[in-house]
Image: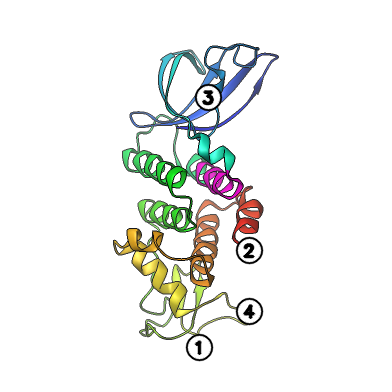
């Protein structure tokens, strides 16, 4: 999967890929910015490609790129494309170079394929929470992360990324990030195996809450803010 690319010299690009066998790989695509480049259009972000590399001293060199799916529908839908870019950015930050992460690769491939055919808000919500779970950042959702008391399914709660999950209102700080029972239920369903059901949900406050919490948890884990966040949140407004 093509995660991102940036210019190198007058005609080349450095392209970052998420691969199944080697994890994240950066490689030079020579002449890709020239008119009539033989594989320039295939190396755009969101494209799924089969590659051949020549192993260089510092960076590999792309010698062949065959399109598996360039997902043209994603580029025709603003909200779907911004969601895709956010998923690519999150993957780029999490993946390690030359360190295979098959589960993450398959999660990204599946999420982009689903988004291209079914551009619903639940796709990016599910991707973020599944990504966090793969990273070992599985949130505490049933009990207060501070006092350990059960948080009833019908009760309002707060979410504290630093503490690793929900906290009861008695333990919450002065300006808590509140989450409704419905928003918390969405996260529970995603992580509990009902992602298919979440994808069928109509857009609304619970999905927006679940995504806001996922972004908060992800950025806390990464210790950085996602550049795509403003675009993604404007699409959910």
The structure residue drawn at horizontal position 58% and vertical position 78%, both measured from the top left corner, is 176
N-terminal of the pair, mark 1 or mark 4, is 1
N-terminal of the pair, mark 4 or mark 2, is 4
Q: Dot 2: within a 10 Å radius of its alpha carbon, few (fewer than 14), some, or many (20 or more) residues? A: few
| Residue toward you, 224 or 215 | 215
Q: What is the spatial separation of the Cα atoms under label 2 and label 3, in whole angstroms?
A: 31 Å
Q: Is residue 86 magenta?
A: yes
For label 2, the SS is loop
Q: What is the spatial separation of the Cα atoms under label 1 and label 3, in whole angstroms?
A: 51 Å
Give the main secondary structure, helix, strand or loop, of the magenta stretch: helix
56 shown above or below 148: above
Picture disc at residue 175: 4
Q: Is residue 215 magenta?
A: no
The residue to which callout 3 is attached is: 43
The residue to which callout 2 is attached is: 237
Bounds of the magenta span?
77-89
For label 1, the SS is loop
Residue 24, image quadrant:
top left
N-terminal of the pair, mark 2 or mark 1, is 1
């Amino acid at each position: 999967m093509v995660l991102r690319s940036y210019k190198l010299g007058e005609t080349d690009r450095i392209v970052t890929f998420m691969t199944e066998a080697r994890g994240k790989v950066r490689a030079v695509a020579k002449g890709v910015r020239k008119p009539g480049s033989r594989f320039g259009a295939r190396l755009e972000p969101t494209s799924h490609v089969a590659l051949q590399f020549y192993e260089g001293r510092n960076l590999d060199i792309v010698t062949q790129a065959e399109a598996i799916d360039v997902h043209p529908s994603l580029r025709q839908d603003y909200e779907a494309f911004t969601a895709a870019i956010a998923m690519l950015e999150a993957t780029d930050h999490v993946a390690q170079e030359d360190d295979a992460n098959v589960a993450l690769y398959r999660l990204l491939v599946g999420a982009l394929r689903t988004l291209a055919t079914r551009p619903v808000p639940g796709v990016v919500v599910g991707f973020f929470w599944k990504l966090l779970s793969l990273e070992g950042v599985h949130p505490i959702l049933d009990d207060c992360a501070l006092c350990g008391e059960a948080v009833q399914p019908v009760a309002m709660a707060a979410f504290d990324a630093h503490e690793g999950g929900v906290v009861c209102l008695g333990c919450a700080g002065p300006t808590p990030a509140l989450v409704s029972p419905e928003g918390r239920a969405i996260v529970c369903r995603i992580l509990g195996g009902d992602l298919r059901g979440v994808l069928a949900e109509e857009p609304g406050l619970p999905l927006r809450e679940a995504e806001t919490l996922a972004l908060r948890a992800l950025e806390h884990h990464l210790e950085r803010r996602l550049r795509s966040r403003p675009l993604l949140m404007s699409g959910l407004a």
